[in-house]
Image (cartoon, rainbow, N blue to C red):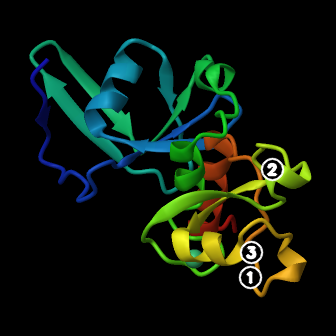
Amino acid sequence: MPIQPSSQPLSRFKNPVVVFSNNYLPLARIPLKRAIVLLVTERAESLELGTTQQWEVRSPNLVLQVSEHIRLVGGHRERHWKVPSVTRREVFRRDQHRCQYCGSRKQLTLDHVIPRSKGGPHSWDNVVTACAPCNNAKGDRLLPTTNLALKTKPKAPMHPVMAFAEQFWTEHPPD
Ligand SMILES: [Zn+2]
């Protein structure tokens, strides 16, 4: 469907629409086109939050008010997420590709905080991103016997909904 925005200026942002779950948690910012698809297929409805901005979108046979905030009616997204396996890729992603000891972004490896040889599990709270120099310096020892310290306590990645909500409410504190 060709989209002809009305005379109202479109938001400068690439992803101007915030999608909320059916229990009103902000989930993600999405492009206007995706919001239109969700609204037209009735998988989402407009959400009015006082200052909510609206865009009028016209196609040959449809005039649609697209709200800056839409809410999913259903909530399928939450059901399919599970904690990812402890892989190199997922651990690096959780740690934002930084060594958890010194912050370096180079020569990244996985480190078992409690070494496997000492019974440390391959689990989210025992595996961190470490650069090769820190990993070598630590060797097969327990942290307290080294002069390395973790920047953050490792834990399983958060449900993306919760992670987004946390960030969203940090940026948009409720009045
Ligand atoms: Zn390091």
Would residue 143 appear left or right of 173 to someone viewing this image?
A: right
Query: For this rendering, which residue is in front, 53 or 81?
Result: 81
Q: CA distance from mark 3 to mark 2?
A: 18 Å
Q: Is residue 151 visible?
A: no
Would residue 4 appear left or right of 124 to someone viewing this image?
A: left
Residue designated by label 2: 116
- The amino acid type, in three-letter code, at marker 3 is Leu
Q: Are dots 1 and 3 in contact, CB under 8 Å?
A: yes
Residue 62 lies, with reference to residue 138, above or below; the image says: above
Query: For this rendering, which residue is in front, 143 or 91?
Result: 143
Q: Secondary structure at mark 1?
A: loop
Residue designated by label 3: 150
- The amino acid type, in three-letter code, at marker 2 is Arg
Quadrant location of the C terminus in the rendered image: bottom right
Residue designated by label 1: 148
Hey, which quadrant is residue 110 in on the image? bottom right
Q: Quadrant of ligand 1?
A: bottom right
Tell me the crowding category of disc 2: few under 14, some 14 to 19, or many 20 or more residues within 10 angstroms, Cα based: few
- The amino acid type, in three-letter code, at marker 1 is Leu
Quadrant location of the N terminus in the rendered image: top left
Q: Nearer the viewer, mark 2 or mark 1?
A: 2
The picture places residue 7, in percent across and down from the top left corner, at 12, 47
Query: For this rendering, which residue is in front, 174 or 141?
Result: 141
Q: Is residue 117 visible?
A: yes
Task: Please report the residue visible at 83 percent of the width from the left and 74 percent of the height from the top.
Answer: 143
**Total marks in image:** 3
Residue 125 lies, with reference to residue 149, above or below; the image says: above
The picture places residue 134, in percent across and down from the top left corner, at 61, 76
